[in-house]
Amino acid sequence: TQLLEQSPQFLSIQEGENLTVYCNSSSVFSSLQWYRQEPGEGPVLLVTVVTGGEVKKLKRLTFQFGDARKDSSLHITAAQPGDTGLYLCAGAMGSSTLGRLYFGRGTQLTVWP
Amino acid sequence: NAGVMQNPRHLVRRRGQEARLRCSPMKGHSHVYWYRQLPEEGLKFMVYLQKENIIDESGMPKERFSAEFPKEGPSILRIQQVVRGDSAAYFCASLGQANQPQHFGDGTRLSIL
């Protein structure tokens, strides 16, 4: 069973388009992290959100944590070919982040020039 | 400013052999996590160790798999009598203290012939 459901699984768009990736669960998380992974490499942390309703911006990327801390979204504005990669959401449970992370299956994003 | 170091990056074994995967955490990090990634799947938690102690091994198969994180030296994930289904990318992450994010290595790609 997958605790975190990511959608869509694949996304192929043209440069300049906007997109949103969703990460949903029926469970509550103490924090949620978004990673980006390139082929042959490990996941690289993009952002951590910890407060329900929190919104964080990282240049053209906007991350939101749901009010109930069960879901999150990643919105990319004016996508560029350099944004291509596998985007993973991961949630932590419990009062601290010392425990395991629960990962979604990932969204493979391809941005064409 | 070394990150999480994993070696080897690629490992080929024949069925029945042993595989040893090593992970050196970031400097100052005493918490180590192992995850397994299969194609088109997210990362699946295997085990969480803190120096010389296994904290959570709920994601690790009961047979053939073991992990250690000795006082000195890297963390080791050992797979005995490997089978084809063990083929995957194995990632290690480390963390310094509570409420900090996990930082990942670039993984070991294990192939079983």
Image (cartoon, rainbow, N blue to C red):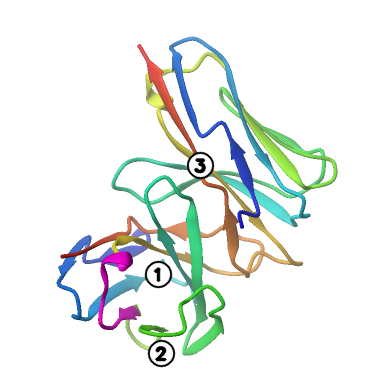
Is A89 on the left-hand or right-hand side of B19?
right
Please tell me whether mark 3 sits on a helix, a strand or a loop: loop
Identify residue for label 2.
B71
| Inter-mark Cα distance, 2 to 1 | 12 Å
- Expressed as whole percent of the image width and height from the top left, the position of residue A3 reads 65, 54
Q: Chain of mark 1?
A: B
Magenta stretch in the rendered image: B77-86
Q: Chain of mark 2?
A: B
Q: Chain of mark 3?
A: A
Mark linked to residue B25: 1
Looking at the rendering, in which quadrant would you find the C terminus of chain A?
top left
Residue B101 vertical placement versus B75 (above, below): above
**Tags 2 and 3 touching, CB below 8 Å:** no
Closest to the observer: B18 or B27?
B18
Please tell me whether mark 2 sits on a helix, a strand or a loop: loop
Circle 3 Cα neighbour tier, 10 Å, few/some/many (<14 / 14–19 / ≥20): many
Please tell me whether mark 1 sits on a helix, a strand or a loop: loop
Mark linked to residue A46: none
- Expressed as whole percent of the image width and height from the top left, the position of residue A107 reads 50, 36
Q: Residue at x 43, y 49 (%)?
A: A43
Specify the amino acid type for callout 2. Answer: Lys
Q: Residue at x 57, y 77 (%)?
A: B58
Identify residue for label 3.
A106
Location of residue A93 (image quadrant): bottom right
| Inter-mark Cα distance, 2 to 3 | 35 Å
Residue A108 vertical placement versus B67 (above, below): above
Specify the amino acid type for callout 3. Answer: Gly
Q: Residue furthest right?
A: A68
The answer to whether residue A96 is visible is yes
Q: Are marks 2 and 3 on the same chain?
A: no
The answer to whether residue B74 is visible is no
